[in-house]
């Protein structure tokens, strides 16, 4: 994850983190628009049916740039980094 420096660092399709009622939310940007207050983002969880409300840049904590996850199959550990796979 990185801390975006400006609105230009966030694009539709990016995954961002922001706080909502004290909870850190990680959702994908589905719209980037502008109104009288400036640029705003509409996000949506990948498994959610409806979009979230407007998010302003000042509310964004991070932009996700990669995800590392692993699972165990028998005694083998497999690490995934985006599209790369590493076996240990």
Image (tube, grey):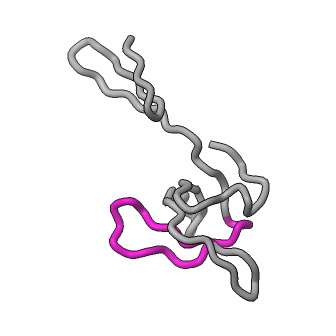
Q: Is residue 39 above or below residue 80?
A: below
Looking at the picture, how far across and down is residue 50, in whole percent?
38, 75
- Quadrant where the N terminus is found in the figure: top right
Residue 40 part of the magenta-drawn span: no
Q: Looking at the picture, tell me which residue is in the foreground, 30 or 53.
A: 30
Residue located 67% across and 56% down the image: 61
Residue 72, quarter of the rendered image: top left
User: Could you tell me which residue is drawn at 47 percent across and 30 percent down?
Assistant: 81
Q: Is residue 86 above or below residue 29?
A: above
The residue under the point 35% across, 67% down is 48
Q: Given the current orientation, which residue lies at the most extreme left position?
A: 74
Q: Residue 65, percent across and down?
A: 58, 42
- Image quarter hosting the C terminus: top left
The mark tally for this picture is: 0
Q: Does residue 85 sit above or below 37 in this rendering? A: above
Residue 57, quarter of the rendered image: bottom right
Q: Residue furthest bottom?
A: 36
Image x and y of residue 49, in percent: 33, 72
Q: Is residue 58 left or right of residue 12?
A: right
- Whether residue 43 appears in magenta in the rendering, the answer is yes
Query: Which span of residues is magenta-colored?
Result: 41-59
- The answer to which of 26 and 86 lies nearer the viewer is 86
């Amino acid at each position: 994850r990185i801390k975006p420096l400006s609105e230009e660092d966030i694009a539709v399709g990016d995954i961002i983190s922001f706080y909502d009622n004290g909870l850190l939310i990680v959702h994908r940007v589905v719209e980037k628009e502008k109104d009288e207050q400036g640029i705003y983002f509409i996000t949506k969880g990948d498994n959610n049916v409806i979009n979230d409300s407007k998010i302003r840049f000042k509310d964004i904590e991070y932009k996700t740039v990669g995800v590392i996850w692993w699972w165990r199959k028998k005694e083998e550990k497999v690490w995934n980094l985006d599209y790369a796979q590493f076996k240990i």
